[in-house]
Amino acid sequence: MAFRGMLLWSIASLSSVCFGQGLRISTHVYDLENAPAPGEMLSSSLSLCHNGKIYDYVNAADEVVIYDPVERQFTILNNSRDLSTTLTFDEIRHKMDSLEPRTTKYIQELRSTGTPAAERTANAITFQLHPKFEQSFDPMNETLVLSSPTMTYRVETCKWAEADQVERYLAYADWTARLNFILHPNSLLPEPRIALNEALRGLKGRMPVNVELDLRPGDNLHLRAAHQLTRTLSDDDHRLIAKWELDLKSKRVQRVPFLSYQHSVLVSKSR
């Protein structure tokens, strides 16, 4: 998880048979700070890993994002709007490279105002752009912590026998963090999540099962993403994948440029 919604190296060497045996990841994101009831669920998603691709589905939006490391691209299908689009990894990297100078300029503008609120915002964005965490791992509780004055990750992990599967999942999480920021510009910058993925790589064969993101006290935000991992896909899972692949070929689904798709998503959310 990224945190989909918020809850992501080189991919060129990924095999087309990665996840060929299937992997199912059910994710629920909880608000631990602002919900009317403590721990209220904010969103849920389903990730189905099959034949080299990962299908990440959010039921509330009726949107599936298909990660294809062989073709080096994401395909996004939204059945509620009958739209689909494609964004390549190269396009994502180009967008991220062009973002840094604009972000740096914005930070300078914030600091020039001289207000405490603007300074706090500038510090938070600066950290997200170049995150530096203190890292610790508790082997008894199998918990990884990345801490800083402005942001903390607490991650419960489990040992996973297929180490190559962990690496491929983390590569997917890297690219998804970047995609989510491009698709939803008001979300966190991807670098902190990418730093977390790199720390998980260092644990050698561990998958995240619970990921907490804590931005207090600077921001009143504390989320937890709970992952349930299953090594096989069900018949229903296979039917979903087949349906999505057919939907992408359907005449009712209009293929549009990414910016048109993004505009449609943002306009819909603003209503």
Image: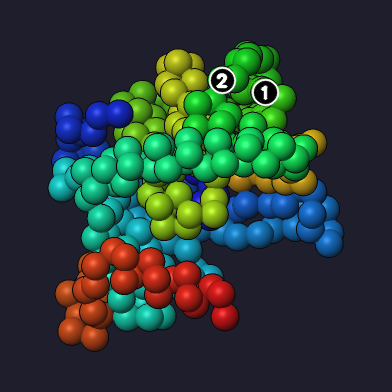
Mark 1 neighbour class, 10 Å CA radius: few under 14, some 14 to 19, many 20 or more: some
Q: Residue at image x 17%, y 29%?
A: 13
Query: Label 1 amino acid?
Result: Ser
Q: In the figure, 148 relative to 15: above or below?
A: above
Q: Mark 2 belongs to which amino acid? A: Lys
How far across and how far down the image is residue 163, in percent?
A: 36, 24
Farthest residue, direction right: 37
- Where is residue 257? Give x, y as percent: 24, 67
Determine whether, in the image, residue 269 is placed left or right of residue 167: right
Q: Does 98 appear above or below 80?
A: above
Give the residue pinned by disc 2. Answer: 132
Q: Nearer the viewer, residue 207 or 116?
A: 116
Q: Earlier in the sequence, mark 2 or mark 1?
A: 2
Picture coordinates of residue 131 (x, y %)? 54, 25
Q: CA distance from mark 2 to mark 1?
A: 7 Å
Q: Quadrant of residue 254?
A: bottom left
- Residue that carries the numbered disc 1 in the rendered image: 148
Please name the residue shown 64% across and 32% down the image: 123
Q: Is residue 146 left or right of residue 254?
A: right
